[in-house]
Amino acid sequence: MQYPLIAGYIDGELTPEERRRLEEHLGRDEHLRQELAAQREAAEAMMAYPVVGVDDAQWRQMWQEIGGRLPGSAKRISLESLTEMDISADMLNEDDLFDQPVPLLLPQNMPPLVAVKTDTLPPAGPKPQPAAEKASSAEKSKTRPVRLQGARQAPLFEPLRVVRSRVRIWAHVAGLAAAAMIMLMVVLSVRPVIPEQKLARADEVEIEMSITDASRSMVRVMQDEDGQSIPMIWIAQVPRESGDIQ
Amino acid sequence: MISRLLNKQVSRVLMAGLLVLVSTASASSEQGPAAAGRSVPMQAEGEQQAQASEVIEALVVLASKGERESVDGRLAEVAPILKAHFGQQFNVFRLSPTSPTRGRVRQGERDGIRMSLIGNYFLRTIFHGVQKEEGKPDMVRLEIRLTQSVRDGERTREVTILGPLRLSLPRDKYFPIGGPVVDGETMILFLRVTR
């Protein structure tokens, strides 16, 4: 059973009302208390691991190593799917990979994961598939399931995976937002601010100009496509000293 | 792929930017007197006062001669008319980044309003009322003055470049005034009256 509020309770992110409700349930529900204890232990275990910095070069090298061992389409496999319990045998180069340490980014004190064939392991996990059903489904998909030995510690990666998935959602939203912004900027950049039909035609304007202005400026007449006159005042000579108003 | 590289903070900033952009775009994309009215606090002033005031909008187009022809997409409709008139004189037309400028001018204000155009150029406008004739659009009577502020020692003076000039314009029509040169580009001001 899922208890979505427990993680927030451990991280102190619940509202007072949610906290009160959860604590009421905790008082009544033994399973919930066990779940809380398990998640708290996991969280503390996570916090206990030192954070090892991996620079871009190391990261690229690691993925090149993984990619070199995987055939074709399997090179697109992500770190997240490698932490799953089962992966398909046809995605891995068995000769190279089986019984070899899988180069995952693991905490320092955690033993490296080793890929082994499923039939060498007893069924594991909370809901093991019946062997016959598993074999038939494997035969159907023409893949042979393998298991990463040591991956029983995968719950340690669970909070990390949640964070990653949230970041991924936000990244998708950000990508969409960026694309929308670019489209909006393109639309705005081409939208005419002075439509041609909004230019005042000669018969729509009255101008009274002083003699001084008439001597240093002129009324020029432009024409639109239909030959209609569009008047414009053109200042030919900018005075230097005359006409101070302040 | 690109989106994977973006982190949570960046996405939030982008979302905020998008919201700002969308709100700005929706405000600026609406044309006509109603939109101009919203851009200036006028709704609460009552009909009588609204009739005795107008919104002046100034758009500054900068024209120059470049090695290659270039026209701002927003000037796509007016640029051919300008090019046809000026011939080889200008082949680059762009909209001033500070445009448009808007200001509300009220009838009876002796000094009117002063709007910044570009560089040290300003537009002073006095509103003299609306001329109504049956069967014709209203004509808004304005007195305009194009000025330039110049430094004279420690003092700054404002020199009149053009005007006072009396103009009668229908609402929502642009009237061009050009000629002054700003940093090597020729300014063409498009003046419009809205409500």
Image: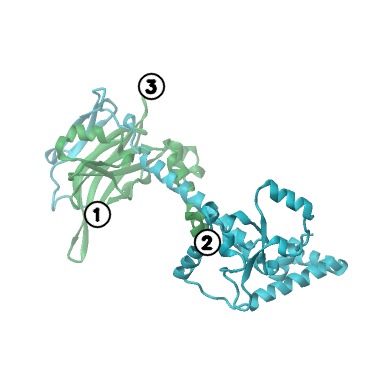
Chain colours: A cyan, B green
Residue occupying image coordinates x 25% and y 54%: B119
Q: Which mark is residue B120?
A: 1
Distance from the alpha carbon under mark 3 to that under mark 1: 41 Å
Q: Nearer the viewer, mark 3 or mark 1?
A: 1
Residue that numbered label 2 is attached to: A69
- Looking at this view, name the residue that lies furthest to the right: A28
Give how far apart the Cα atoms at labels 2 and 1 are. 68 Å
Which labelled disc corresponds to residue A197?
Answer: none
From the viewer's perspective, is A179 left or right of B126? Answer: right
Q: Secondary structure at mark 3?
A: loop
Please state the chain letter of the residue tagged with numbered disc 3 in the rendered image. B
Residue A49 location (% of width, % of height): 62, 77
What separation in Å lies between label 3 and label 2 (alpha carbons)? 86 Å
Camera-nearest residue between A14 and A240:
A14
Three-letter amino acid code of the residue under disc 1 = Asn
Question: Of circles 2 and 1, which is in front?
Answer: 2
